[in-house]
Amino acid sequence: MKKFILISFAAILPVAAFAADPSLNFHVVPLEGFSGNSQFEHRVIPYRFFDTMTVVVEDPDHCGQKPINARFAIENGKLTLGYDLTPFKPGAESCLIVSQFDITGLPHESLDVAFAGGDEPYTVVKLKKCEFYQPISSDIYECLAPAKDPNAK
């Protein structure tokens, strides 16, 4: 009996021991023709499917700047995203940097999403259950979308 319990425990342990830590995959979406408009606004658009969060960020900055050192942290119910920006030339026009953060291996807990590129204050977005998605289980993390429509003004 003891061998059976020990073998059962040993079979379960590796699954828990090798659970994936959250990881980040970051992409910059190249855009052409989005310069000269100073009316760009920050937009943070997160979607969560199971243990993966995809966040598209529209970040108004100066033309020629590039995001570097993309990072994330999970603390106090918040997924915090950010990057540093390369320097810009004086007099550079306004441009829009569009980027995508894909974070996998998220814990099963409610997470707000916060983004800041460079020294700006964080833009925070809350999530809710997807309205269009019919869940196949009771897992509330199957599909989450922004609580406020990202296209609403």
Image: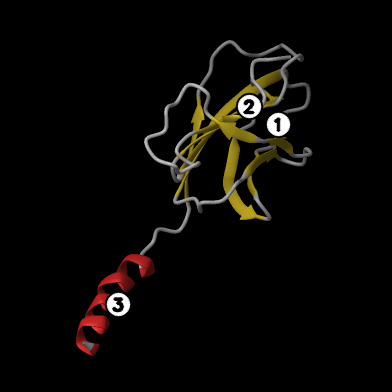
Residue type at numbered disc 3:
Phe
State yes or no: discs 2 and 1 in contact (Cβ < 8 Å): yes
- Local packing at callout 2 (Cα closer than 10 Å; few below 14, some 14-19, many 20+) is some
Marking on residue 64? 2
Front-most of residues 90 and 82: 82
Circle 1 sits on which residue? 88
- Residue 56 visible here: no
Please provide percent x and percent y for residue 129. 55, 32
Which residue is located at x 20 percent, y 87 percent? Answer: 3
Task: Using the rendered view, name the quadrant where residue 14 is placed.
Answer: bottom left
Give the foreground label among 1 and 3: 3
Task: Using the rendered view, name the quadrant where residue 62 is placed.
Answer: top right
Number of disc labels: 3
Circle 3 sits on which residue? 9
Which residue is located at x 64 percent, y 15 percent? Answer: 151
Q: CA distance from mark 1 to mark 3?
A: 57 Å
Q: Is residue 137 left or right of residue 77?
A: left
Relative to 144, say whether 148 is above or below.
above
For marks 2 and 1, the one nearer the N-term is 2
Q: CA distance from mark 2 to mark 1?
A: 6 Å
Q: Secondary structure at mark 1?
A: loop
Please provide percent x and percent y for residue 83. 63, 43
Relative to 14, say whether 104 is above or below.
above
